[in-house]
Amino acid sequence: EIQLLESGGGLVQPGGSLRLSCAASGFTFSSYGLSWVRQAPEKGLEWVSLINQYGNTYYADSVTGRFTISRDNSKDTIYLQMNSLRAEDTALYYCAKRDTSGRYYFTNWGQGTLVTVSS
Amino acid sequence: QTVVTQEPSFSVSPGGTVTLTCGLSSGSVSTSHHPSWYQQTPGQAPRTLIFSTDTRSSGVPDRFSGSILGNKAALTITGAQADDESTFYCVLYLGSGISMFGGGTKVTVL
């Protein structure tokens, strides 16, 4: 069974930093890309970032230059380093497994970790 | 700035049919955008329904179907049931690793 377990969320002040983790199991981690998708309170889903199986990284305009996605294939884990956090970054952050067969969709989702940016 | 557009809300009667659409602020949606659809109920993670325009994910009932209608992607629910009451999101692949969600359509079954 594929599982994605996010952690690392919490309360942080504006301008602060936080690192999220997503531990994966149930599939050959190194062969797949994974994304972060967030959802602000009472709002829709927003794609944040992707790291593919080759380690190439991609970001939404809203986080470019502030967030960094990375992966550790020895730990079956991806990370999201979030710097210069703003109130508008407050959201539930989901980890999502990406299809690897050129179909560009999210196959599995975690349950999310909550990030609150507030003074 | 590219925006993926969805209707904010729809209402459908039990047993009825509803078609949700997913468009692009700049141009037409095609199969090369690899449209996918996700269902989310309050407090739950999204569930993958449709990928590659019209392929149902494992375990998804066949009352859900995807297509291209005109210049938009579409999700049709045929024979709506009470537990279909959810918010539905489309995602389009814009190239260069970038995916974009629509704003979501809240479907009410009543």
Image (cartoon, coloured by chain):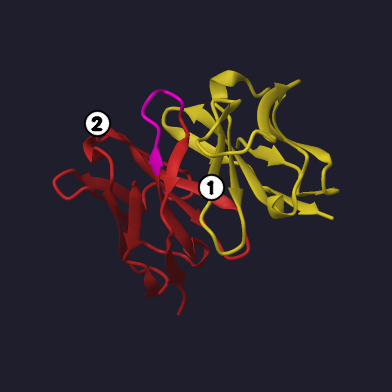
Chain colours: A red, B yellow
Direction bottom: furthest residue: A119
> Who is closer to the viewer here, A28 or A84?
A28
Determine crowd level at label 1: few under 14, some 14-19, many 20+ residues with C-alpha closer than 10 A.
some
For residue A117, which numbered disc appears in the image?
none
SS class of the residue under badge 1? strand
Find out whether residue B90 is within the magenta segment: no
* Three-letter code, disc 2: Tyr
Q: Is residue B5 above or below residue A15?
A: above
Q: Which residue was labeled with disc 2?
A: A54
Whether pointer 1 and pointer 2 mark residues with C-beta atoms closer than 8 Å, the reply is: no
Q: Chain of mark 1?
A: B
Q: Is residue A69 above or below residue B1?
A: below
Q: Is residue A45 visible?
A: yes
> Quadrant of the image for the C terminus of chain A?
bottom left
Residue B25 in the figure: left or right of residue A96: right
Direction left: furthest residue: A74
For the residues labelled 1 and 2, the Cα–Cα distance comes to 26 Å
Q: Position of residue A5 (x, y in %)?
A: 33, 58
Q: Which residue was labeled with disc 1?
A: B47
SS class of the residue under badge 2? loop
Q: Position of residue A89 (x, y in %)?
A: 48, 61
Find out whether residue A101 is within the magenta segment: yes
> Who is closer to the viewer here, A54 or A106?
A106
> Where are the magenta residues, as a range?
A97-103
Determine crowd level at label 2: few under 14, some 14-19, many 20+ residues with C-alpha closer than 10 A.
few
Question: In percent of the image, x 43 and y 60: which residue is there?
Answer: A112
Question: In percent of the image, x 31 and y 49: which residue is there?
Answer: A68
Question: In percent of the image, x 46 and y 26: which residue is there?
Answer: A103
Question: In percent of the image, x 42 and y 71: which residue is there?
Answer: A14
Majority secondary structure in the magenta region: loop
Are marks 1 and 2 in one subunit? no
Q: Is residue B25 visible?
A: no
